[in-house]
Amino acid sequence: MVKRGLSDNESEREQEWRNRDKDEESSNSSDENEEDYSDSNDYPGNQNKVIKDRFQASDSEEDDDYDVEFEKHVQEARQEMQQSAKKLKQLTPEQLAKEQKKIKRSGVVYLSTIPPYMKPAKLRHVLQRFGKVGRLYLKPEDPKVYKTRVKTGGNKKKKFVEGWCEFENKKDAKLAAETLNGNKLGGKKGNFYYDDIMNIKYLKGFKWHDLTEAMNREIEIRESKMQSELSQAHKINKNFIKNVETSKMIENIKKRKKNAEPTVQRVYAQRSVTTNRAGADEWQKDTKNAESGKLKKVLENIF
Amino acid sequence: MSDFASLGLPRWLVESLQAMKITKPTNIQAACIPEILKGRDCIGGAKTGSGKTIAFGAPMLAKWSQDPSGIFGVVLTPTRELAMQIADQFAALGATVNLKVRLIIGGESMTDQVAMIKENPHFIIATPGRLAHIIMENEDECRGLKRVKYLVLDEADRLLTDSFTDHLQTCFESLPNPNKRQTLLFTATVTDSVRALKDRPVAPGKQPVFLHELDNVDTVKIPSTLRLLYVLAPVVVKESMLHNILINDDYKESTAIVFVNRSETAEILRRLLRHLEVTTTSLHSEMPQSERTNSLHRFRAGAARVLVATDLASRGLDIPSVELVINFDIPRDPDDYVHRVGRTARAGRKGDAISMVTPNDLSRILAIEDRVGVKMEELPLSDNKVIKQSLKAVSKAKIEARMDMEREGFGERRKRRKEREGKTKRRK
């Protein structure tokens, strides 16, 4: 799986975010929507989580094409992950020290509520006032809740229930938490989010990788289990193929020899047959549940 | 007799039947409708797909239109899906006369249903379990049931088994005496209990019970348009073979029902086939009712090509488009086989039934062949194709399906329910 934290890949990612931030500033509102998805996905282990969430949703949704498409999506994601795992390069000691320092310096804040309908891009914008913002993950609301809301004529916009945000410097994180927590978002009077109160807490001694670790471990365990089961299935399949070949061979031999040797016969334990049919033979009858007194009483009451 | 009007049905009913494209009565309809109109009790036997629902629905409606009063009739069926189907048919028949039909089935809001009974609908279509439950808890609201004129037991052979007796007993207690109502039984296979009913002495002051083809029903076993096939399948590659049959040239586009013996197998197969891009839904008792209804709707509408189901779907369901029935597991009771394959080849259409036979199923297959009186033919299925097209993909999909199910906690609902039941029993 992807090793996170001390890799080139990581810094690549960071670079990406920075670029994205720049993009964001320049982007207009029309492509903000896309931004919001990618932003909430950039929580690395999250890809799987979102997938899981969607999967549950898709179970209740009755859309097969969607499912098929989604399967493809999962496979692509897997391939991507494998590829990125291959690309990992060894870091030089200096680079390693630098990375570690960077991680040590960073701080994470937790948002127990997100102002209704606020998108990740907007939140990032709010938090950026306090310093450089790294990764940001917002948990989308339960798809069932969303569905019922839309069905009953509610707002169609996406809502998020909680979130985490990483600052490059702890100080900024602490400052952000202290300033925003329990206060109105403010700004211009006409702002959509003007009256929304922020709930934000600095998580002491908490790093971003603490968030992803448990999930990654789970994925790893699942993957390894999958591997072992696959290899077992492979063995069974191989055996079957071999048997098919042998049977063909035997058939051919039989064809060539007119008076074949007596064939080997195996006896299998047979599954039982039971029925309540009136015309059936006695041995098939289900004697265990033979007409109890209750059934008789019911029968008496019918006509 | 060649049309419904001559059977004694009123004009509006004949017209609404015509609107449903039903113009010619089948044997059972021609025989039973006049007798029921005369007021006789009736036991009707006919093979699958021969129009039993209309045979009891039409005369009941005819009588009702002459003298509508209170709750006129109660129809009991073993499964919720069947109840829905019957309710739909009643609603279609009575669309022109403002007929009130209500469903009383498990898995839906009970308070709503109590209110439904209270408002005295014309007909109630129910499953015994929920009806009994409501009667036990709200005796006062259910007084309307005491004046019911007709009681119908559809799929009577299944209803008259131990699994339903307690509930049936409760229902009967709040229904009127047998003398004061007409009782109609319909079934495709005859069991000991049904036969025992036939031999009961007639109660004084009542006309003798009318029997239709009860003794011959065993000889007319399955529709002649149905082709019975088998395929020998080792246990380990059963799934691959199933997949191969479904993507095979012959059945690439046909609508199919796959029958299994356990809910878990049904769930695994549904996920597995979905992984392999076969549009699939399932129907089994581990699903919540809303999903059950939904997936059956999807299958009916053709949004899914394959329905994986347990014996829940084996009786009564009328889905005309089904061309293929696959018995992934062989049923224990040969009669169940008759019901299962009866989902296809309905009303004179063609259909195939494939049984997947493992070495352990031989005696079951022999019993089935003995029962239906037809020898099955072998379905040509090349091992090479199975190996090439299906084996690897299927085994992978199966593992994925099983792991997904494990993660989502499949079967926990049943476990919890069992625990709960265990507790109440201990308390007693």
Image (cartoon, rainbow, N blue to C red):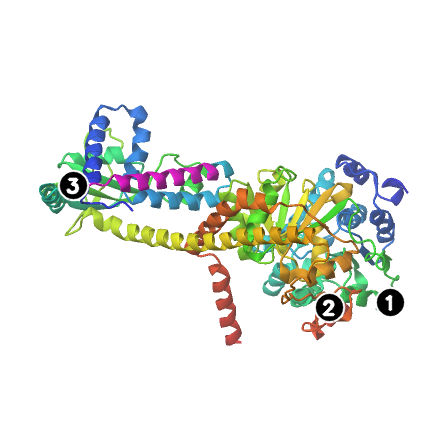
What's the mark number on residue B408? none
Q: Residues within 10 Å of mark 2 (few under 14, many from 20)?
A: some
Is B140 drawn above or below residue A158 in the view shown?
below
Q: Is residue B150 magenta?
A: no
In primary-sequence order, the first of circles 3 and 2 is 3
Q: Nearer the viewer, mark 2 or mark 1?
A: 2
Q: Quadrant of residue B147?
A: bottom right
Q: Nearer the viewer, residue A93 or B265?
A: A93
Numbered tag placed on residue A167 in the rendering: 3
Q: Which callout, 3 or 2, points to the residue nearer the camera? A: 2
Quadrant for the C terminus of chain A in the image = bottom right
Q: Which residues are magenta?
A: A67-90
Amino acid at circle 1: Val
- Label 1 crowding class (10 Å Cα cut-off): few <14, some 14-19, many 20+? few
Q: Secondary structure at mark 3?
A: strand
The answer to whether residue B104 is left or right of residue B187 is left
Judged left or right of residue B206, residue A245 is left
In percent of width and height, residue B283 lies at: 58, 50
Neighbour class for label 3 at 10 Å: few (<14), some, many (≥20)?
A: many
At horizontal 36% and vertical 42% (from top left) the residue drawn is A78
Instruction: Give the amino acid at mark 3.
Output: Phe
Q: Is residue B312 left or right of residue B8?
A: left
State the CA–CA distance, disc 2 to disc 1: 31 Å
Q: Secondary structure at mark 1?
A: loop
According to the image, label 1 marks what residue? Answer: B202
Q: Nearer the viewer, residue A137 or A142?
A: A137
A85 drawn magenta = yes
Q: Chain of mark 1?
A: B
Q: How far from the left and from the top, in percent, is residue B149?
A: 77, 56
Q: Is label 2 in a helix, a strand or a loop? A: helix
Question: What subunit carries mark 3?
Answer: A
Residue A284 marker = 2
